[in-house]
Amino acid sequence: MGQKDEQLHNKLTIILTGLAGCALLASGICFAPPGTVVLTLCLGVLLLGLSVIDIRTLTLPDALTASTVLLGILMVWLTRPEAWRAHLIGGLVGYGILVMVELGYRHLRGKDGLGRGDAKLLGALGVWTGWAGLAPIMLVASASALVGVIGLSALGIRKVDADTPIPFGPFIALGGWVVWLGGRFFLPTGLY
């Protein structure tokens, strides 16, 4: 990448991050579950930060995923302590499912296809949404990743093939954000 391309990329990153931050703020204030606006905005900031880092480096830092877990535990303790089991199960199952996918892919293909940070992020979001949020998170994440990859290829922005590394964290983050904000509309009562 030339210097001009890198400068353009950096400017676009700043603009898009700013727009995403504004959207995060507006959606968090408007749609946060009752009593969770501040925690929701903190979650949004963590997810946005994780997404930007994953896009740039293909890594999800443990410090930020652990912070997402701890913030989720605080949210459960403050707003829905009676549902702690569903949220604990969500964290454990979310992490476990993607670890199994990671190990299965490595066994079948002989190379890594999913990073452990993705499993940690899904586990963290499982703490936030409970076990009932995991399938919708992965549905949104998978569908948006598919649309994103097809869009990049179709527009000629980036050639994508089976060996192209694709950061999945931003798509998991998007799924978690959508399910967290919209969960009361489609998750079972009592789990949200």
Image (cartoon, helix red, strand yellow):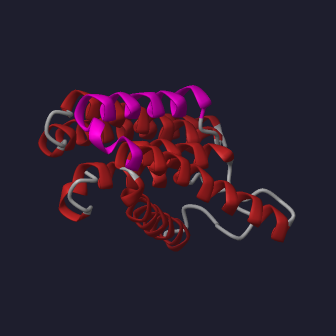
Residue 87 against residue 187 in the figure, above or below: above
Q: Is residue 83 found left or right of 189 in the rendered image?
A: right
Residue at image coords 41%, 59%: 137
> In the picture, residue 73 is in which quadrant?
top left
Residue 98: x %, y % from top left: 62, 57
Q: Where is the N terminus found, in terms of image quarters?
A: top right
Residue 108: x %, y % from top left: 82, 71
Q: Is residue 14 in view from this perspective? A: no
Residue 67 against residue 33 in the figure, above or below: above
Residue at image coords 26%, 28%: 78
Q: Is residue 129 in view from this perspective? A: yes
Residue 69 lies within the magenta run: yes
> In the picture, residue 190 is in which quadrant?
bottom left
Residue at image coords 59%, 51%: 167
* Observer-nearest of 134 and 165: 134
The number of numbered discs placed on residues in the rendered structure image is: 0
Residue 185 lies within the magenta run: no
Residue 8: x %, y % from top left: 49, 39
Name the magenta segment's main secondary structure: helix
Residue at image coords 49%, 69%: 155
Q: Is residue 106 found left or right of 36 in the rendered image?
A: right
Q: Which residues are magenta?
A: 61-86
* Observer-nearest of 19 and 134: 134
Residue 120: x %, y % from top left: 58, 43
